[in-house]
Amino acid sequence: MLWAITTSFSASAQTNLDSLERLLPTLNGKERINVAGELSYQYCFINTDKALQFGSLELKLATEAGDSASIGMAWNDLAAAYISRGEFQTSLVLNQKALGVRQRLGDSLKVAASLGRIGHAFFEIGELDQALSAFIRAVKIYETNNQPVYLSMLLNNIGSVHQRQGNEPKAIEYFEQAIEVAKNSGNHGNMIAAKTNLGSIYYHHGDFTKYKNLLLELVELIEATGVREHLATITMNLGATYLAQGDLDSALHYLSTADTLFEAKKDKKSLSMVKVDIGICYAKMKAFDSSLQFLELGKKYAEETGSNVQLKHVYEGFKDLETERGNYKLAMEYLGKSLEYNQLINSEEINSKLAEMDVRYETEKKEKNLALRDKALADAAVKSKNQQLVILLLASGLLLILGGIALLVRQQRLRRERLQQKSILALQEERLRISRDLHDNIGAELTLITSSLEMLSFKASNADKTELENIGSYSRNAMGQLRETIWAIRSDTISVESLSLRLMDYAAKLCKPLDIASQVQVSGGAQRALTPTQTIHLYRLCQEAINNAVKHAHCKSLGIQICVDAVQIAVDVVDNGVGFDIDQTSQGYGIKNMKARAEEMGGSLSIDSAPRLGTQLHLRLPLQR
């Protein structure tokens, strides 16, 4: 796993911990309870055995004293130790006990802290709907009480939930919010965690060099700030990145370092992940005995944590080992087990509840605005009614009728506004439902087809292997287009800037291997909102233009300029390639489809080109004022 839910735990210098341990026996009463709790809390990232030892002492002393607040804190500290060990079910039970105590005491900030850790446990178990619910409840409390340190942590965690679901645009949005809040509050630990999570998206897009450089920068930041609680995770991610790039020696170095750090903490979740990665590394080195040894250890820890995410990763590791050994039938069986756990992680029930929670959270501001408008209209109606009563005493019944008509019109207008609001919310829910169906059904089938083709190609003859690889390429392309469509329809609006970032990534993937310089520039209203329909049409148009330039233009540079003003969006795609004679070249389906898309949006598309003078595509799309 290349990213992790973050917590508010921190590690003090060992000298300070030694001083606290020496001080503890000399104390009595509340002071002794507090120091035992501080030792338990601080040891979470250093030595979980000691964290449990001092947490148990804290609970014993608090119980003997009959101090409810201290008992709640003791449950909390013990839960922190267990979650650091990767024992999420135990942590969940203890955090729920702490939550109960804190709710009875009415301590809202402590309630929020327990909710955050409950969300963490649910996330690791795979209960994403429960995790998001707990995180959102905690966020509301921290926002109300102006607690930016904890708020940045929770925003980061919500981003991780969306990333686990596959909603990368939403995940990026929350990670960037978390980074900004952490930066403004001076919390280096939360900023490092959020940047690590944001960087993991580079990894999943295959941009390993960019991700690796980010991780190395974070290591330098850790050394400069002394905030070391995320060092083990970052080191593990560096190892995984080198492994993905095929640098096995560097991968084994960083993974072994992370393994040592996690062993000291007895973090079972992370130990499972890192030992499986080490096992995969040894498998690729053809050291099969060592590979099997580490994979078995990874499986042991995964089974102890009960995490479907870890178990999925374990069977992926066994699949890689048997593939390297040439045992393709057994490798296929392990692939099947991995896909089974993947289905459990992304089950329809979980995604349904998660999407429902997402809609509820995203529309909260709309509901608040509607409530304010209702109150204003109600106040206006009361005022109007009072005025009508005065007029009734002074004037004729005709004015009473007119007042009644005015009130009826006002009520009908209010009813129409409410129906419109409900229609907007229903449309949002329908978009989410469609995107879930695409992801869960078609996406899952394409993933299974692609994985099966990859396994079959290992055993095929050269001729058949080529054909299977071609089919696999078609399947992967279909999966990419499916993800792009899901991205476009999930939100009611998408900014021009978000579209430009997608285009930048797409252009770089095609141009970089061919040494073609590419850039995307935006001028004017970068935050101008586009509808899902406008977004997908614009993206497909530019995608086709990029493909044509890369395949046919033999260019050295490719530029996309997006200019937004009050009345239109203008997109120019320019390359310095060989060009062509427009009058002598028939327009294929690609150009016809591009013009059809432009016309469907009420816009226009024109192409300028000449031999040896490159090609310029000009798209103009009117925008509503």
Image (cartoon, rainbow, N blue to C red):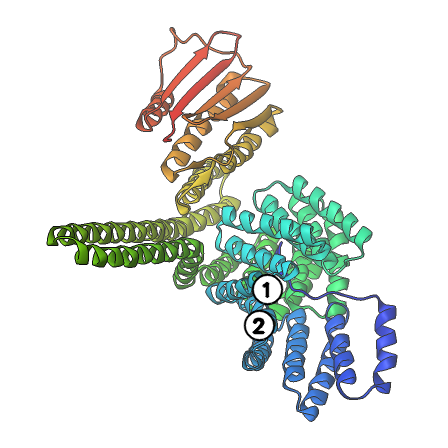
Q: Is residue 76 left or right of residue 338?
A: right
Q: Is residue 358 left or right of residue 200?
A: left
For mark 2, give the secondary structure. helix
Residue that mark 1 sits on: 145
Q: Nearer the viewer, residue 222 or 625?
A: 625
Residue 111 x/y as whole percent: 57, 73
Marks 1 and 2, Cα distance to the nearest angstrom? Answer: 9 Å
**Is mark 1 in CB contact (under 8 Å) with mark 2?**
yes
How dense is the environment of label 2, judged by Cα within 10 Å: few (below 14), some, or many (20 and up)? some
> Residue 15, located in which quarter of the rendered image?
bottom right
> Residue 23, located in which quarter of the rendered image?
bottom right
Image point (62%, 24%), residue name: 515
Query: Dividing the image into 4 quarters, which one contains the C terminus?
Result: top left
Q: Amino acid at mark 1?
A: Asn
Q: Nearer the viewer, residue 363 or 392?
A: 392
Residue 147 x/y as whole percent: 63, 61
How dense is the environment of label 1, judged by Cα within 10 Å: few (below 14), some, or many (20 and up)? few
Q: Is residue 572 left or right of residue 77?
A: left
Residue that mark 2 sits on: 108
Residue 593, above or below 424: above
Q: Amino acid at mark 2?
A: Ser
Image point (80%, 88%), residue name: 28
- Residue 6 can be seen in this image: yes
Residue 454, above or below 497: below
